[in-house]
Amino acid sequence: MPRTFPTPRRPLTVPLSAAAALALGAGLASALPASADNGHAPAPEVGGVYGASSDPIEPGGVRIHDVQGTTRRSPLVGELVDGVPGVVTAVAGSGSARGFWFQDTGGDGDPRTSEGLFVFTGEDTPEVRVGDEILASGRVSEYRPEENAQTITQLDQGSWAIVSEGNDLPEAVLLAEDTIPEGYAPEPGGDITDRELEPHTYALDFWAAHEHMRVRVEDAPVVAPTDAHDAFWVTTRPEHNPSANGGTVYSSYDDPNAGRVKVESLVDHDEEPFPKVNVGDTMSGAIEGPVYYGRFGGYLVRATEMGEHVPGDLEREPVREAEPHEVSVATYNVENLGAADEQEAFDRIAEGFVASLGNPGIVGLEEIQDNSSETDDGTVDADATLDRLVEAIAARGGPEYEWRQISPEDNADGGVPGGNIRNAFLFDPEQADFVDVGGGDATTAVEVEEGASGAELSVSPGRIDPQHEAWKETRKPLVGHFRAQDRDLYVVTNHFSSKGSDEALHGVNQPPERVTEPQRNDQAEVVRSFADELLSVDPEAHLVVMGDLNDFQFSRTLEVLTGDGPLYNPMTGLDADEQYNYVFDGNSQALDHILVSDGLADRVDYGIARINSEFHDQVSDHDPQVLWLDTRR
């Protein structure tokens, strides 16, 4: 028999009663899409009628677990439900996607069905408080933040009645070391939306089965720093694939590290500023709040309690300087550095060169923008950008570098429109000479020629097959011929196409499709062909292929370059906990590489300057790397 709730203790300020709202909005409800420009379905336009009620309130026949069901999609999607009971556990009172979470204090005992739900109120702050016992009504919808994302089950066009206040909250699910399954996701080869959840087997199913419910993680180790959007990552499994500095290493497609947990905050940042954390820090005490889902990173905790930030001992780690018998070569993605940037950006990168990179003789740069930066005005030259960087390095006591580059065709190489990012070389004339051969431009391909004393380049600097289809709308490799310590050194600096369009690890398609990988594989084939050609002319040639290859040491892209072939990746000689130079979604991973011709494998040393990726105050999201070539043999 339905329970009759008592008269509320405080005056109610609630939307129009469910019955009236649904009657007035029925025609609209059937026509509204499941999502709108602001990321959710709009609130119903029912005339803005508000009022207080002192009439007895009856719950409906639907509970939250009935709405959630045993798959990712609600069995009631599109239907109108009335009088769903629960206790408010958290309120999103700011931004364009406001609303509140409420949770059933009982439940059905089925681990597949979540007992939490979100009521979306658009840009209106809901008039509820944590601890209110409510009856909620509205339309069941599934909001998908972007293609391939999981959907968020919610109520929109909502109304609610407050039954009582100050109630205890349902106990939060403790995310202990063994709570989230090690298996990350089922892999049926497609969309897992309607697949019955197995929360004890797969991490993504665990999260879906706890969608909108309160969870907590205690004394959480930080595995990714605070980002520009006030979020960071912790882990429930600090001993699983640990990095040298306390992060979590991504070392295989088969193991995405299921213990990673993203954290955002519902706490007013004016009252409690969001913590600025680094990898290796700890959030002492409890991080607690409802489970939500976002397009960036997937499932997350919207924290109502954050714990206490306890800094770790992370410090920036420089690499050593070169010995007199060594030639040092570095690669550094400087993240869209352009002449329109503030001087601070140049100064901070310069400080990293001087303090952390050991004054390398040769440097390959990625993401150098043109002189007008992101202004799309037809500018393609980058002399002002490079001059400012060189001057900033020298001003801090570093080498007086010279530079070489080739300007791209306008908006032909990807990146931010108008930015015209490209690869470039810096070199210290006290350590290395550049062998200039004129004629290189945006569309001319460098050729390997047989000279009197070995391989020669038709143009230097030059671009590798720049009109090949593999380089469409992305950066072309830049090749330079250097001479250092009586050795010829051929260097290729690269920036392969982005992984940004790949399906997310947390997405609805499992296994996720790496849709950008074929283009990088083609790019690797083109670069490898150049390496093969150079080494066929001079098998003893000193060749370095480096840069932001935008793929992992275990990927097919790197296999194309290094498998049964002319190039060796010294990163693979590091301990497993050191094989990373970039942090993304809580995974410490490797996107940047320095490869050498196989004959040099036993003559090189290799190091990573850990100065960016693990810190919240980074100047680039990539850590630079340095290779030292022993010229005594």
Image (spheres, rainbow, N blue to C red):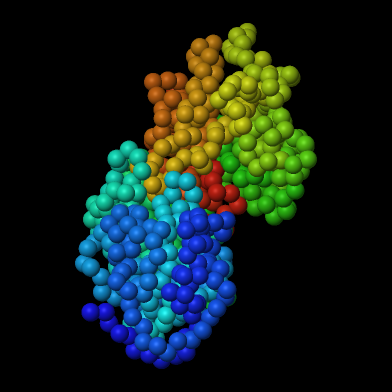
User: Residue 225's spot in the image, x, y percent?
Assistant: 49, 58
Percent from the top left, x then y, of residue 215? 34, 67
Using the image, determine if residue 600 lies above or below residue 377.
Answer: above
Residue lying furthest left = 109
Q: Residue drawn at (47%, 89%), measured in percent from left and top?
A: 11
Q: Quadrant of residue 96?
A: bottom right
Image position of 69 with respect to 528: above or below? below
Q: Nearer the viewer, residue 475 or 68?
A: 68
Q: Is residue 498 left or right of 384 when viewed as pictured?
A: left
Q: Which residue is depicted at the point 51% across and 34% down?
A: 549
Where residue 33 sits in the image (x, y, percent)? 50, 55
Instruction: State the quadrant of the N terminus.
Output: bottom left
Residue at the (41%, 82%) spot, across then down: 162
Q: Which residue appears at 72% of the width and 33% of the height?
A: 410
Q: Nearer the viewer, residue 244 or 421?
A: 421
Closer-to-camera residue (333/62): 62
